[in-house]
Image (cartoon, rainbow, N blue to C red):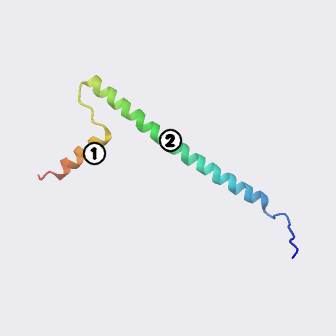
Amino acid sequence: MIAIFSPAENSLAVDRRRLWQFTTAIFVAIGYQWGVLVRIASSKIERRFSIFADVPYHDRLSRQQWEQLWRAEPQ
């Protein structure tokens, strides 16, 4: 059996497709990290404002728990 190899016809298209896949993955990762940074900054701003306003600070998780309890109370 003799194997004959020929160059790919659309080799540039394959390379560009890989580049786009890599670029898309990079942008998704950067977007996720950006969202994390925004949430951290928002939490710090809220915490510092609560200290300035002399009111108790509730982080995101405890605030959700309080909202669930509030909705569950009979009116």
Q: Which label is found at residue 9?
A: none
* 31 lies left or right of 21: left
Q: Residue at x 73, y 59 (%)?
A: 14
Give the vertical position of 30 relative to 52 (above or below).
below
Alpha carbons under labels 1 and 2: distance apart: 23 Å
x then y, percent, for residue 49: 31, 27
From this viewpoint, which residue is outermost toward the top? 52
* 18 lies left or right of 42: right
Q: Quadrant of residue 55?
A: top left
**Residue situated in front as seen by the camera: 75 or 17:** 17
Element type at marker 2? helix
Q: Which residue is mark 2?
A: 33
* 25 lies left or right of 3: left
Q: Which residue is mark 1?
A: 64
* 16 lies left or right of 2: left
Q: Residue at x 19, y 48 (%)?
A: 69
Few, some or many C-alpha atoms within 10 Å of disc 1 (few <14, some 14-19, many ≥20)?
few
Give the vertical position of 21 relative to 55 (above or below).
below
> Looking at numbered disc 2 in the image, what kind of residue is underneath it?
Gln
Q: Quadrant of residue 9?
A: bottom right
Give the vertical position of 21 relative to 56 (above or below).
below
